[in-house]
Image (cartoon, rainbow, N blue to C red):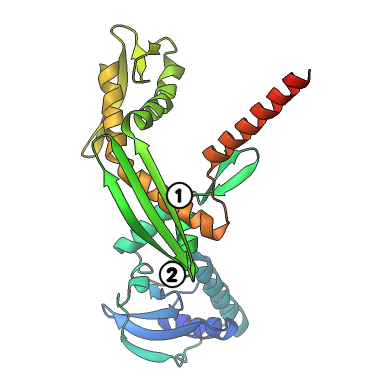
Amino acid sequence: MAGTGKELTDEVLGRAIQEFVSKNKGIEASEGEQDGRKRWLLSPGDIIVQCKDGRLECATTGVKMDLAKIIMDMWDSVGEEPTKPPSLAKRPTVGITTRPQAGSVPGSALDAVRDCQATEKPTYSPGGGRKAAAAKTNIAALMELGGSLHIRDRIHEENYIEYQVAASLGEQVVESSISIFKQEYLAKKAWEWIVRVLIKDPGIVVGVDSYGMPEFREGAEIKIRIQEDDNSFLVSLPAKIALWREMAREWQSAGRVCETKAMSRACDMLLRGNFQNADEIREEQSEVRAIQDNGKAEVE
């Protein structure tokens, strides 16, 4: 280990794991080998710990830091590396034998997926100083409580998508449905996308067509990024073609968006008793203000 002047060995690591287990009730350790190298498996969590080239390897940061501290304390107090091997349950191999364990093996496919998911924000701000759980957080929370989700019905036509989902938790069952019409959905997406273009070229949009989509000045072009293998480069396309290229991609994933929103809303109903999403709440508040303003006008 860096800065200690001593090289970590399997014997030292084994004794450190033994001490770590004794300090953390409910944690168990088993010892085995894979590819000729000794490894330990900590459960629950199926955390792989090993010594490689004199260095401690552990994919779980908290556990790694605790073990490193134990090892440093051992070297400081004893003055030399203990050699007595730990008494741990023997296991013939420490390979990927269960689905949870697969995610704890560095470099595994599941490990890579979880690394990507960890970069996704679990919450977001709908405004007004409030916080809301992201769809993946709602769904994961329901699953952790032992709940389940079931798609009751799906409709995916050329211009219309609808998902009906049921969520259950014990004896509680709620249903949620989300539907989207292609033109309304893409018009909203188009104006979200074009904002970035307007920042650089405010005069590129000159109106709105009959479908609610932006109309561009004559000869307008928009630069889009093309990805090819490991290279990416900007290409100028006629504005309308660039817009429809983006909208085609949006509609391609619209079914998944609709499904996820329906599931998330169903989870919200069970977990928080919230039957309204942020847009519905804003619409309701707007109606309340309109009624209040109308009442004031009549009094005056």
Dot 1 falls on a residue whose secondary structure is loop
Q: Where in the figure is residue 215, as x and y percent of width and height?
A: 35, 13
Q: Where is mark 1, residue-wise?
A: 120
Counting labels gives: 2
Residue under the image location 37 percent in, 41 percent down: 179
Discs 1, 2 touching: Cβ within 8 Å = no
Q: Nearer the viewer, mark 1 or mark 2?
A: 1
Direction from residue 300 to residue 216 in the image, left or right: left
The disc placed on residue 197 is: none
Q: CA distance from mark 1 to mark 2?
A: 23 Å
Task: Look at the numbered disc 2 and give the secondary structure of its residue.
Answer: strand
In percent of width and height, residue 67 lies at 52, 74
Residue bearing the label numbered 2:
58
Q: Residue at position x 54%, y 81% from top?
A: 20
The amino acid type of the residue labelled 2 equals: Cys
Q: Is residue 107 visible?
A: no
Q: Could you say which is closer to the camera, residue 138 or residue 93?
A: 138
Report x, y in % for residue 17: 49, 82
Q: Is residue 30 above or below residue 250?
A: below
Q: Quadrant of the C terminus?
A: top right
Q: Nearer the viewer, residue 220 or 52?
A: 220
Q: Name the residue furthest top.
A: 218
Does 249 sit left or right of 14 as displayed? left
Which amino acid, mark 1? Glu
